[in-house]
Image: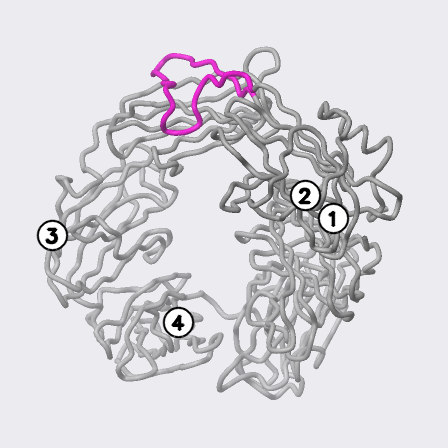
Amino acid sequence: MRGKLLFGAAAAALMATFGFAPASAQTADQPGDASTTATLTGNVDGEISPGSDTDWYRLEVQTGRRYNLALAGIGAEGQAIDPMLSVYDAQGNQLAFNDDANGTLNSALRYVPQQTGIVYVEARAFSAEATGAYRLGVSAEDVPPDDAGGDASTRARVAVDRTSNGNIEYEGDIDWYRLSARTGNRYNITLAGAGEGGLGDPVLRVLDRDGNVLAENDDADGSLNSALQFIPAANGDVFIEARGYGDGYTGGYALDVSAERLPRDNVGNSTSTGGRINAGQTINGTLDFPSDADWYRVRLTEGESYRFTLDASGDSPIGDPLIRLRDSRGEEVAVDDDGGDGLNSYLEFTASSTGTYYVEASSFTGDATGGYTLAARTGDIPADASTDASLSPEGDYREGVLSPAGDRDWYRLTLADAQAVRIGMQVTGTPDSIGDPYLVLYGPDGAELARDDDGGDGLNSYLEFQATAAGNYFVEARGFTEDAAGRYALNVVGGEVGDNMEGADALSAMGDPRTSMIGAAGDVDWFAIELVEGRPYRFYLDSAEGDGALADPLLTLYDATGAQVAQDDDGGHGLNSYLYFASPTGGTYFAAVSSYDGQSTGRYTLRAVDTDVPGHAYTDEILDAADDTRASRIEIPGDIDVYRLTLEAGVTYQIEANGSGGTPLADPFLSLVQEGAGMEDAGPNGPDALIVRQGGHQVASDDDSGPGNDARLRFRPEASGDYLIQVSGLSNAVGGYEVKIARQ
């Protein structure tokens, strides 16, 4: 049981682990800062009293020595203090820390100083209210001589085509080797455990002298050994770092470096490049080796607009081109990945000054090779039928920019008779976004056929259209106001939303929203979705925002035989629909969208989420605060799972979020929110999230305090009441997890 003191034999065992002698007599209370006069030379008994007391001890340390520190509660049962142990320098900077060690509430750590001098050892209790007696001990031992320094001052060097054998001698040891790198070479570097007691899980990094990581690898080729390739951007020394995955890993290793000459690069990747392109010119080129990038010098005129395209081409095309525009110093000013056809790149740019710029042709992955075609065009996209910009009716995505204010861009859209398309115009999410897009569709004769302002999500625009005759149609991208300017994105989806099971559109269970329209009385839109047996799913059907929204949507779910298995009218917010459905058999199911009265028309948004834990304050997942464990998954990037629980004032609780299952959540993040008036669901237009307004606030959070990247926090509430635990994954991580809570 947590809160009981480790004493007697258990305390003695902890001290014995570190080789400590019997304790000296109990000392008087010590200051909690560097003014202390108490010196730690062996073992000492002390007391935390009153609550929030901290005791500091001076400890004289030397480089080349490892100091073993242990802090244990002693005395009668019930006087436990759950001690915490820290090491500080004279300025109060924490150098080392431990709370719980060896499966107990007591603390222990090993400290290897970076310099000779005085440090300060702090004894305190985990809880600000706890008091009790403790025993603090220290022992020291020589650290084996280090074969390589741990920073840029190292004297160890590594040579090409030669094995360097080394050793991680002690916990926390890091070895740096200097490598004289040359451009035009690719260095193949491997780090493997070697010899009896070899390093169990080596980690390999390449760094500059300031410690910036240039390349790194942990596990390679299906083993725990490490390997990487490094291509230097400039001549000079770099540093290869050898270490264990964790501080506890020690042992011997073998470091190997080989080098190979890269193929001759036809175009350089710096401002000294010999490559050149003129406005109106098209150039064919090749990325000759992994990490290659070709820079082309181009002269641009202030206020003029330019369009750059980078397309995969040739017998061995690059695959996924990436285009960048750089200023005269080589600093990036614009970039695009997939703004062209397919994975090709498209970039619009208005020059802010006259002078030399650089167009960079590279790959999205950074290591692809192959052929490309680079084109530089002058002028803005025309705002009439003379435009050379086009959209594919089979599916397309383009990014563009309206510049100057009031600009309009036209795109040619060639349709067959009766061909249907869905066209969307969105803000890009960048600071220079247009803000409020506006779409207009013109026929082959230039007559306006349709327009939309806010038919998409938020202020985005959306049109559905079916051609009445074959020909060239034109999509106009503009802003809602006459003086609008900024970046936008256009997307085209071919075909109508299916009007029966056979023609059903695909619906993802990953939370991706589908926005469409009930265009006529009696219309029904069908979507096919693959469900896994036994898994619960949530379906949201909501009226789209803005004018023309479907007033009262109705959602019906069918199995593969066409049998109705679920239906909802108003289970969501207002008149919106919501279904919670656990698939009994798995397989293909069909979601049918219609209006409740069978006569209404308008726009809607449909979303399906494969998860059993709601991500909002209205969660029905309740945890027993005394002791409870739940397993679930973060299903999609940005997903948040929320659990409700009732906590008592003055009681300490430990809460954990640990990756688990076949595909564990790589980096769980845990936060605790005090529930209160004003908390509301973020709504169905994006991943579920909690919006905390006045009356509800975050009271604690944690990222990596548990084992590895798991999350763990302890919390003592000041007020009793309902709280919410939020579990998510950092950096858009997904996977399984366990959330645990225990009363301490």
Mark linked to residue 123: 2
**First in sequence: mark 1 vs mark 2:** 1
Q: Amino acid at mark 2?
A: Ala
**First in sequence: mark 4 vs mark 2:** 2
**Residue 156: image x %, image y %?**
38, 18
Does dot 1 land on a helix, a strand or a loop? strand
Residue at 23% in and 77% down: 405
Query: Dominant secondary structure of the magenta stretch?
Result: loop
- Please provide the residue range marked out in magenta: 143-169
**First in sequence: mark 2 vs mark 3:** 2
Q: Amino acid at mark 3?
A: Asn
Mark linked to residue 48: 1
**Residue nearer the viewer, 199 or 713:** 713
Asked whether the viewer can see residue 465, the reply is no
Q: Is label 1 in contact with label 2 (beta carbons under 8 Å)?
A: yes
Q: Residues within 10 Å of mark 3 (few under 14, many from 20)?
A: some
